[in-house]
Image: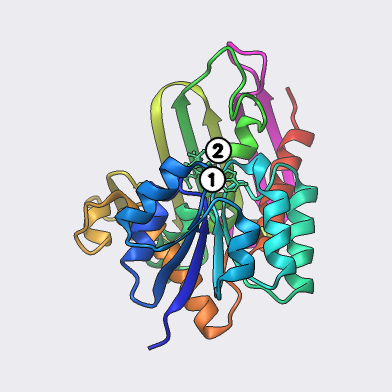
Amino acid sequence: MRRLRIGMIGAGSHANRVHYPSLASIEEAEIAAICDMNRERLHKTAEKYGVKSRYVDYREMLEKEELDAVYVIMPPHHLYDIVVDCLRDGFNVFIEKPPGITTNQTRSLAWFAERYGCRTMVGFNRRFIPLMRLVKAMVEEKGRINQCVSAFYKNLYPEEPPYYRGAVDVLTSDVIHAVDTLRWMGGGEVRRVCSSVRSLFTEYPNSFNALVEFDGGVVGFLMSNWAAGSRIHTFEMHSKNASAFVNPDDKAIIYMDNKPEPRVVSTFEAAGGSKEFYKYYGFYDENRHFIECILKDEEPETCFSDAVKTMELVDQIYRNSIT
Ligand SMILES: NC(=O)c1ccc[n+]([C@@H]2O[C@H](COP(=O)([O-])OP(=O)(O)OC[C@H]3O[C@@H](n4cnc5c(N)ncnc54)[C@H](O)[C@@H]3O)[C@@H](O)[C@H]2O)c1
């Protein structure tokens, strides 16, 4: 069996919560080297995963290590130059969402990936949540999804603009998960968008609602509000004679053929019984997908050029606001 040698740039909180444990449990992957300019995080993470090759300068790591892929996991406004350096050196690259801070950055990254023949992936993990994939397949067995909903609510509206002290807006940084999942459920190119962008109790936009028409007449609804009661992140998928209501933190309720009793599937059951967050919330499966695509020389589902379309939909939501 071939094991891919992975270089990690970034040993911060999200990477430690989901990517290191995911990669450590994928047999075909080996965390071969770690780079973080924060020495404490570097050594703590490297000790935990038994990694000897440690760097504070990513260029040195790219030069010295034989790597099959590089993960660049850090705040989006720090990504761009590092990812371009990796791509120009011919490395396959995995990054977190958002894929840069503007559509132009994402488009340029996709250009470099194409030009230098690299496989790339953005961590839009909601698409890889085992419960979401299972339910989508069940609903699609009845026919094409004709209507879908992505809802994302939080209670997070500080006076100082988030995220990263206002470096990236709420929609691009976080609501983008719901936008990308809507595209995935809608299953086609975006035709038209009508939206409402509001600032609730803040001076920056924090509520984004949109009606999106996809090819084939599929209608998608985005509902989000960062001044809501709590974090609630749910989805709906409807096809002919099937309707699914999904809360990936908990369970899915699926109604079929006008029967009053739904089928109920828990998120842990869909993840093979695992209660590990990185497994039931899609991180393990997205990492697996990336590794498998490199081994098979295939384009990952959420490659940079696909991520451009999600960023374009973000732009359309801003552009087409009626409020
Ligand atoms: N998919 C999700 O649900 C989800 C959830 C949380 C965060 N994220 C994403 O994860 C990413 C990382 O967020 P985080 O909060 O873990 O960040 P973080 O700040 O905790 O970690 C980033 C790490 O990168 C290191 N770093 C920064 N620049 C570097 C450089 N030039 N060279 C070497 N090391 C460098 C920092 O020292 C830090 O340790 C963000 O893009 C965020 O949007 C995704």
- What element does badge 2 sit on? helix
- Frontmost residue, 229 versus 34: 34
| 17 with respect to 189 (left or right) | left
Question: Within the image, what quadrant is residue 254 found in?
Answer: bottom left
Residue at horizontal 52%, vertical 48%?
A: 36
Q: How is the image coloured?
A: rainbow
Question: Within the image, what quadrant is residue 208 found in?
Answer: top right
For residue 201, say whether it is visible: yes
- What element does badge 1 sit on? helix
Residue at horizontal 38%, vertical 57%?
A: 20
Residue type pointed to by label 1:
His
Give neighbour class at mark 1: few <14, some 14-19, many 20+ (Cα, 10 Å). many
Q: Is mark 1 within 8 Å of ligand 1?
A: yes
| 269 with respect to 322 (left or right) | left
241 in relation to 32, above or below: above
Which segment did they paint magenta?
Answer: 186-214
Task: Report x, y in % for residue 141.
Answer: 41, 71
User: Within the magenta stretch, is there residue 205?
Assistant: yes
Disc 2 to disc 1, how far (Cα)?
6 Å
| 258 with respect to 222 (left or right) | left
Residue at horizontal 33%, vertical 59%?
A: 49
The residue furthest left is 273
Residue 174: give its label. Answer: 2
Q: Is mark 2 within 8 Å of ligand 1?
A: yes
Task: Report x, y in % for residue 66.
Answer: 55, 76
Task: Report x, y in % for residue 39.
Answer: 47, 43
The answer to the question of whether label 2 and label 1 lie on touching residues, with beta carbons closer than 8 A, is yes
Residue type pointed to by label 2:
Asp
